Amino acid sequence: MPNTLNPLELIARRWQPSARFVRRAALATVVMAVIIVVTGGAVRLTQSGLGCSTWPKCTPDSLTPTAAMGINGYIEFGNRMLTYVLCAVVGLFIIAARARHPRRRALTRLGWAQFWVVMGNAVWGGIVVLTGLNPYLVAAHFLLSTALLTVAVLTWQRAAEGDEEPRDLVARPVRQLAWLLVAATGALTVIGTVVTGTGPHAGDAKKVHRIPLDWQEITQLHVDFVYIVVGLSVALWFTLRAVKAPAAPRRRVLELFACIAAQGVIGYVQYFMGLPELVIGLHMLGSALVWICVLRAALALRDRGPLPEEDAVVPAPSDGHEAPGPQVAAASSR
């Protein structure tokens, strides 16, 4: 009895995507993760968090929003539908990574990790709705989105490099400084969710429970961590110059400087203008971009060699005849 192949194996026998296609598919997952962060913020800022009153349906009697629910229902439901788009993009990456020769199990594992984070966050979002936008659960919902973005950035990085053992490009203290910067930026993000949980934009026009902390004090703590992140970024830049690090890591830190500068301007504008919704949305976008730049700066401090050459690809047998000899695919782009 012939062996039964799973669908991914069947696709891999008939389609060999290029290394560039896999990298672009990985980048698409990063873009979609950022979009999910921004649109989730739009749901809260337009007071549409309970636009759909229940989950997984939109109302107890309808899967989709009704005209009586107004624009808020459509905004909330539209954000739910984006989850399916995100799943499709992640699925495309998983298929492309699996079909790529030689097979790189690390990439497919990262793709599946993204898929399960998406599924978990979708369920968590439903719990947020069912609990009436509990601020602690809302904060965790955002942090799960940040976790998805983290895995997506790591996937994008791994799709552009080889599978050799990591080789450090700088001394250990420099790498420790970079990961300290990552930790400080992570703490900044967590504190930002607390600021949101104490602030005026609760996500719904009705009275919603808020975190019982002083908003201005938490905001000041958030600003203090901004200064810490800026200071560590400057220290990393001068350290990389002092040790004559390769150009790529220094370029990543310059990209981080640009994102931090833009994010700082947006942050002060939103504070002094009384937290306008549009500016807060831009601040959430900036938060995602800063996190991406921080991760890329840290990951640029090691090298895993070039992308592996493509294996010989043997077409699947058809019509009961013996398969022709192996065909050597073009070498992958570097």
Image (tube, rainbow, N blue to C red):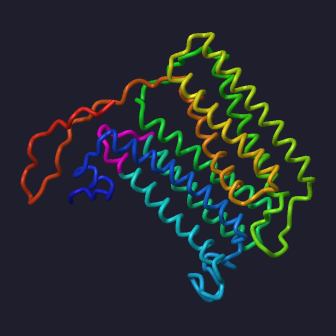
Q: Is residue 77 above or below residue 321?
A: below
**Quarter assignment of residue 226:** top right
**In the foreground, 325 or 75:** 75
Range of the magenta residues? 96-106
- The residue that appears at 10% across and 41% down in the rendered structure is 325
Q: Residue 89, how many percent across, how many down?
A: 44, 56
**Quarter assignment of residue 236:** top right
- On screen, residue 180 versus residue 198, left or right, reads left
The answer to if 101 sits in the magenta stretch is: yes
- Position of the N terminus by quadrant: bottom left
- The residue that appears at 48% across and 23% down in the rendered structure is 303
The answer to if 306 sits in the magenta stretch is: no
- On screen, residue 120 versus residue 235, left or right, reads left
Q: Is residue 100 above or below residue 8?
A: above
**In the foreground, 241 or 334:** 241
Q: Residue 5, how many percent across, how many down?
A: 28, 56
Q: Residue 334, how many percent across, how many down?
A: 34, 30
Labels in figure, total? 0
Q: Residue 253, how many percent across, how many down?
A: 60, 27
- The residue that appears at 44% across and 60% down in the rendered structure is 88
**In the foreground, 274 or 321:** 274
Q: Is residue 61 above or below residue 11?
A: below
Residue at the left extreme of this rendering: 321
